[in-house]
Amino acid sequence: MRIAACLPFVVFAAACASGPQTPLVFALHETAPVKSSDDAADDPAIWVNADDPSASRILGTDKRAGLYVYDLAGAVQQFLPAGELNNVDLRQNVMIDGWAGDIAAASNRTDNSVTLFVIENGAVAETGSFPSLLDEPYGLCMGAWGGDVFAFVAYKTGDLIAYRLAGPGGGEEAARLKLESQLEGCVYDDDVGVLYIGEENRGIWKSGFDGAAFTAPALIDEVAGASGVKADVEGLALYKTGTRTGYLLASSQGNNSYAVYRREGGNAFVTRFSVGAGEAIDGSEETDGIEAVSASLGEEFPVGVFIAQDGFNAPKGSAQNFKIVDWRGIEAVIQAAQTQSAAD
């Protein structure tokens, strides 16, 4: 694949390097590093400020200490010392047992629980928790279906439990799913009732979930297959362009890249890209969690953002952080891949 020109700050591809390479995009901003050293930053989520999109917030876990809240330039706005939070996700404008608002959930390995937070005007407050029914809650994503809100918790044992939330401070089991080996990343498509799950050393699965039960999971891509995804399969995210259209993204940790699939139909593979090192901001490697949103977030991010945890954050020391990428760069990579596919 070749792109006629190297677009400043947006995307580079094989045209900008010698030999065939994974296309590159570049971070516009990066967050301040978490305070914990070594392997600590893990998973982001994005809260969209409907009144002032440029004042939206990024939630990012420090799995040794708690939850960070950043602005879109990456500056710390809050830190909540809530424990060893691994994954975080949120849902906005939901109603749970008479309570209405924006709620976030995080898997907490300090006390084997799911910790809940309420977000009001960009400020995050811890509101309660409920116990995990299995040891070491690991991956987590949220979903809304049939008037209920769920926290899906994935475990290293291959188990996944859907917990139905009961207000901003509680939850109970709704359904279970079992795969063969360690799980972490997941994302739920509220519009169609489908949960995507990353089995780290096997691939990406999809399963229907109607609030009461899961359908038999189907494998949509596997490690070491034609798409080039390499273990571990880590974070998953959705970028929605319509009610049923858009893209599924997955962190391919073993080769520092991100796979892109169609959201609709059989989730056909589209392309892969990496976040490269620019003049002022380094790239991302060994990524755990990712997130994407298609909402306009102001002049810098008119069609949304992609957020990736950076496992190295070199050369700034041992503390990890999150890279903030303008979606327009990724869209250019997708369009180039589609043009090449049509020409083949």
Image (spheres, rainbow, N blue to C red):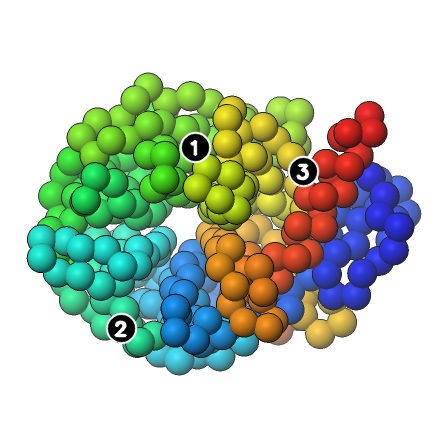
Relative to 164, 294 lies left or right = right
Nearer to me, 317 or 154: 154
Label 2 element class? strand
> Which mark lies nearer to you, 1 or 3?
3
Residues at circles 1 and 2 in contact by the CB criterion of under 8 Å = no
Q: Please give the residue where the numbered disc 1 appears in the rendered image.
A: 199
Q: Please give the residue where the numbered disc 2 appears in the rendered image.
A: 120
Occupied quadrant, residue 327: bottom right
Q: Which residue is at 16% across, 49% downward?
A: 165
> Which mark lies nearer to you, 3 or 2?
2
Marks 1/2: CA–CA distance: 34 Å
**Precedes in sequence: disc 1 or disc 3:** 1
Q: Which residue is at 58% across, 66% downward?
A: 301
Residue 92 visible to an observer of this rendering: yes
Occupied quadrant, residue 344: top right
Hey, what amino acid is under mark 1?
Glu
Residue 201 visible to an observer of this rendering: no
Hey, what amino acid is under mark 3?
Thr
